[in-house]
Image (spheres, grey):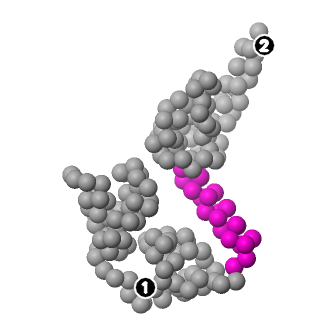
Amino acid sequence: MGSKKEKIISLRKKGFSYNEITSKLNCSIGTVAYHCKNENLDSNGKYKKNTPEEIDKWQKFYDEGKYVYEVAEKFGVHKATIGKYIILRPNQTEEEKKEIEKLRKRKERKELKNKAIEYKGGKCEKCGYCKCSEAMEFHHLNPDEKDFGIGGHTKSWNVIKKELDKCILVCANCHREIHEKLKEDNWS
């Protein structure tokens, strides 16, 4: 089909979101944003400039107390673009900035966990449980091969996939049972 840039532009013109493109092409959202911005593609994948009316809508939504990333998600525009065009709240405290970043990271980790769960089949490999993603965990089959725990990391998807390939997906209950059995085996 062509270069990564051509694939990004093609998917964007078909209406795929930045997140969908990053998943399909296994690239960073920054790469997608860079190529779309250089091609001047709007939220529908069409060429255009941001109109004053659109920027006004962004500003109004932001002024309702929303964060830049929320404005970007709602209007399908990269957050860097939003930041360039709207007037940011000048009196945001350091505490507020930290809280925003904490919420953003929490959301990012949840999305990554859901992607990892989907990658591993979406259900517990022991009992078939699949109701709540919070109850799903990744058990390393060989602890000596474990490079890091799946969870609080913001590593690239390729690095995470390699680690996931060393794991099985289990629910929290089955995971506890696995570790209890391992303890019993070590004590015998």
- Spot occupied by residue 75 in the image (x, y as percentages of width and height): 45, 75
Mark-to-mark CA distance, 1 and 2:
66 Å
- Spot occupied by residue 52 in the image (x, y as percentages of width and height): 41, 90
Task: Assign the C terminus to one quadrant of the image.
Answer: top right
**Residue tagged by mark 1?**
54
Left or right, 163 with reference to 92: left
- Spot occupied by residue 157 in the image (x, y as percentages of width and height): 48, 46
Q: Main secondary structure of the magenta part?
A: helix
Residue at x-position 40% and y-position 49% = 26
In magenta stretch: residue 97: yes
Residue at x-position 67% and y-position 25% = 178
Please give the range of residues in magenta: 92-112
In magenta stretch: residue 77: no
**In terms of sequence position, does the residue under pointer 1 or pointer 2 come before the other?**
1
**Residue lying farthest left?**
1
User: Looking at the picture, which amino acid does disc 1 mark?
Assistant: Glu
Q: Is residue 169 visible?
A: yes
Q: Nearer the viewer, residue 146 or 176?
A: 146
User: Looking at the picture, which amino acid does disc 2 mark?
Assistant: Trp
Q: Is residue 71 above or below residue 148?
A: below
Q: Is residue 64 visible?
A: no
Q: Is residue 161 above or below residue 110?
A: above
**Residue tagged by mark 2?**
187
Q: Is residue 151 above or below residue 184?
A: below
**Dot 1: element:** helix
Tell me where residue 11 sits by quadrant. Answer: bottom left
- Spot occupied by residue 14 in the image (x, y as percentages of width and height): 28, 64
Q: Is residue 65 above or below residue 161?
A: below
Dot 1 alpha-carbon crowd within 10 angstroms: few under 14, some 14 to 19, many 20 or more:
few
Residue at x-position 33% and y-position 71% = 38
Numbered badge on residue 137: none
Residue at x-position 21% and y-position 52% = 1
